[in-house]
Image (cartoon, rainbow, N blue to C red):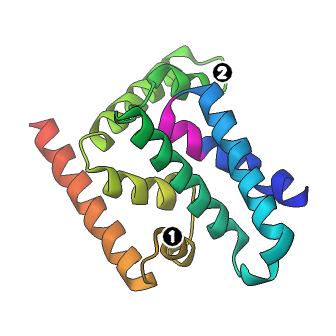
Amino acid sequence: MALYDEYSDAMYRFMLFKVSDRDLAWDLTQDCFMKTWHYFATKEHEVENKKAFLYTIARNLVIDHWRQKEKRATIDIDLVAHTIEDGNDLYATTVLQDEIRSLMGLLNKLPEHDKEILVMRYAEELSFDEIAKTTGKSNVAARVHAHRALKKLKMIAQKHRK
């Protein structure tokens, strides 16, 4: 249960970002923990990094979901905007929502694997070791991929400004 308490919110946010549907994100999050608990029942000692293990399962569940549905995930800006805390400064909230909308639009122009690595690194704040274990790449390959994806995002942003 400690594993769930520690990582359920992060897994839910990851799922929500990927599927843009609150109910589906909760279902996938629960599936992620059920698969983890079933695996840990006999093989917990084989898992060195539980967080990376969870992200690997989460990523695979999302891939399975989209393969079944045969469509790409999109970002629901209303869901992202809903997570912004209500404040007294309506202007600041509106500006932040516009920035989020713009960033999501730019991210959606990236290939899925680039978008995924940027989300893991900057939204979920995973280390490169955790990203490497989640994606099955080496630490160096994860760093290079993140760097290249960020460069692509910057190029897209520059083209978008013109």
Q: CA distance from mark 1 to mark 2?
A: 34 Å
Is residue 9 positioned above or below 89 on the image? Answer: below
Q: Is residue 162 left or right of residue 119?
A: left
Residue labelled with disc 1: 131
Tell me which corner region of the image, top left, top right, bottom left or bottom right, holds residue 42: bottom right
On whether residue 19 falls in the magenta region, the answer is yes
**Amino acid bearing label 2:** Gly
On whether residue 104 falls in the magenta region, the answer is no
Which residue is located at x 81 percent, y 69 percent?
40
Secondary structure at numbered mark 2: loop
Question: In the image, residue 162 lies at what x, y percent?
Answer: 8, 37
Residue 111 visible here: yes
Question: In the image, residue 72 lies at what x, y percent?
Answer: 34, 36
Earlier in the chain: of badge 1 and badge 2, it is 2
**Amino acid bearing label 1:** Ile
**Closer to the eye: label 1 or 2:** 1
Residue labelled with disc 2: 87
The segment highlighted magenta reads 14-20
Question: In the image, residue 88 lies at what x, y percent?
Answer: 65, 17
Which residue is located at x 24 percent, y 41 percent?
109
